[in-house]
Structures are given as structure tokens and as C-alpha cells.
Amino acid sequence: MTILQIEHPVSDFENWKAAFDGGERRRQAGRVRRYQVYRPINDPAFIAVDLEFDTRDDAERFELGLQDIWRSPEAARVLGGTPRSRIVEVVEQKVLDRPAAT
């Protein structure tokens, strides 16, 4: 599994989220399998996103497309700074058993 990780400040979370939600078709066409959006508890003007792909090639293609979008005037209105991205591979994933409540 390959993940494209993105993080950056946002000027207004609600506007950013609306723009992000508007990209659903792009994510489907780009073969994103699943995503998660994070906001630090102590910094609501910052976001992080993990986009999951089946292949590294899909992630790299999608990242290139995002770089074009980030340079657009529309993106400038919601970005609070330059996005940082990196592609990572999951090397281990485990669900831990929790002890039963007593």
C-alpha cells in the first residue's frame, strides 16, 4: 500500500474543506482508494491528509496533478502556506487487541 501524505496551513478550514470535497471525482479518477484528513488539536489552521493508493505510480501521478492545482489562484485562496507532500509505503500495520473492560 502506498500513501501520499500532504500537510499545510489553511487560511480557513471550512473553505479548504469545501474545496477538498469538490475534488471527489478527481480522487476517484486518480485511483485514490481511501483518505483521511487530520487537524492538529492545538492548531486548527493546519491540516494533514493521507491518500491511499494501490501503486506507487498512481500516487506519483496524483501528486504531480496536485502540484499544478496548488499553483492555481483558486488554491491560493484556501492555502495558508506551501503544501508539503511525500509518498510513503506502509511496511507494517497491525490492529492491537484491547483487553476486555471489567
Image (cartoon, grey):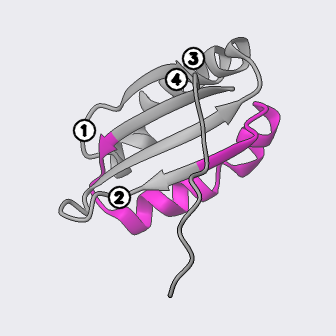
Circle 4 residue: 68
Query: Eyeballing the image, is 102 above or below 19?
Result: below
Q: Residue at x 76, y 40 (%)?
A: 33
| SS for dot 3 | helix
Circle 1 residue: 81
Residue 72 seen in the figure: no
Q: What is the magenta range?
A: 8-35
Q: Position of residue 48 (x, y in %)?
A: 40, 45
Q: Are marks 4 and 3 in contact (CB under 8 Å)?
A: yes
Q: Position of residue 35 (x, y in %)?
A: 62, 47
Q: Position of residue 3 (x, y in %)?
A: 58, 29
| Tag nearer the camera, 3 or 2 | 2
Query: Eyeballing the image, is 95 above or below 17?
Result: above
Query: Eyeballing the image, is 42 above or below 84?
Result: below
Q: Quadrant of residue 11?
A: bottom left
Circle 2 residue: 39
Q: Is residue 37 magenta?
A: no
Rounded to the nearest angstrom, the CA distance separating label 2 from label 4 is 24 Å
Rounded to the nearest angstrom, the CA distance separating label 1 from label 3 is 18 Å
